[in-house]
Amino acid sequence: HFDNSTTSLAGQISSLSIYQSAACELLPTIVEAEPAPVTLTLVAGPSQIVTVTLHTTATVGVHLNVRSLHLETSPGTALPEFATPDGFTDIRLSANGNLDWVDELTVPADAVARAWRQGFTTVLATLQYTGVDTLGRPANAAATWLLNLAACGATNEWNDNTDSATPLIIGSPMSGHLCPMGDRDLYTVDGNAGQTIWAAVEAAPDTVDPELSLYALGVTTPLLTVDDSMDS
């Protein structure tokens, strides 16, 4: 409020906005999040340090205090039976602020095994941060990584036992990662008695010499094994 005795207004204020109604509000507070690195793989371990660059052009400050992890098999499709964990965080962005927030993204082992059993070799991992701006309005930001679930060479690799074998669909090729020194990856396929199927393992030249075995479900002795020459 000011009256006619105010003479130095122009030297104190850069601009004035006059509204007809008190219902006029500031624009919504939008916080953008950029993840780094862009993709992750479990070869580096179930817990990895990531950086989320947060940016807002809002004219008010933001406090994000709740952090949650979401796992999706595709955009908008949550990993079945995965309970999203929430936790406290303390991210404060000033008006028109920028911040490189360092976080630790940890993927639960049971969630990875469940994804493998359902035939997914990658998932989308999202860290979502929620809170309010200084006006009390909801604010949020989310960073998403493509997470490769292959843990080649790691102890208890997800598809190296019958409980976590990766399902195959006849007619749909699948890529995988074989590590040297005797790594074994297991896949399952459904068929009918008397049905004939053709199976092949193709390796990149000068990498490994794969061997293909067929097992009955739950039986550790192979029904048959085929092995050809190197690089063929």
Image (spheres, rainbow, N blue to C red):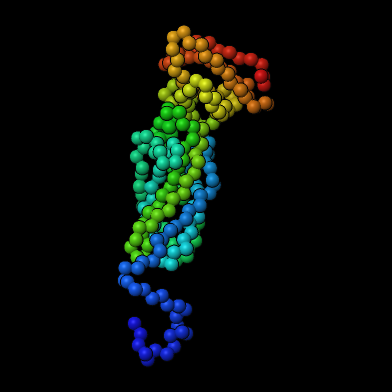
Q: Is residue 159 shown above or below 3?
A: above
Q: Residue furthest top?
A: 194
Query: Quarter-wise, where is residue 115 in the image?
Result: top left
Can residue 101 be seen here? The reply is no
Instruction: Name the spot of residue 135 as percent of width and height, x first.
Output: 35, 65
Residue depicted at 34% across the width and 39% down the height = 83
Q: Residue furthest left?
A: 22
Q: Does residue 134 appear to the left or right of 148 in the view shown?
A: left
Q: Is residue 217 shown above or below 118?
A: above
Query: Quarter-wise, where is residue 114 in the image?
Result: top left
Q: Is residue 198 shown above or below 104?
A: above
Instruction: Name the spot of residue 192 as percent of width and height, x first.
Output: 44, 12
- Closer to the camera in the image, 96 or 45: 96
Instruction: Name the spot of residue 137 as percent of width and height, x first.
Output: 34, 61
Quadrant of the image containing the N terminus: bottom left
Q: Is residue 186 shown above or below 32?
A: above
Q: Does residue 107 appear to the left or right of 81 in the view shown?
A: right
Instruction: Name the spot of residue 15 as percent of width and height, x first.
Output: 45, 78
Q: Does residue 15 appear to the left or right of 205 in the view shown?
A: left
- Closer to the camera in the image, 165 or 109: 165
Q: Residue furthest front?
A: 20
Quadrant of the image containing the C terminus: top right
Query: Quarter-wise, where is residue 117 in the image?
Result: top left
Residue depicted at 52% across the width and 21% down the height = 171
Residue depicted at 64% across the width and 15% down the height = 228
Residue depicted at 45% across the width and 15% down the height = 191
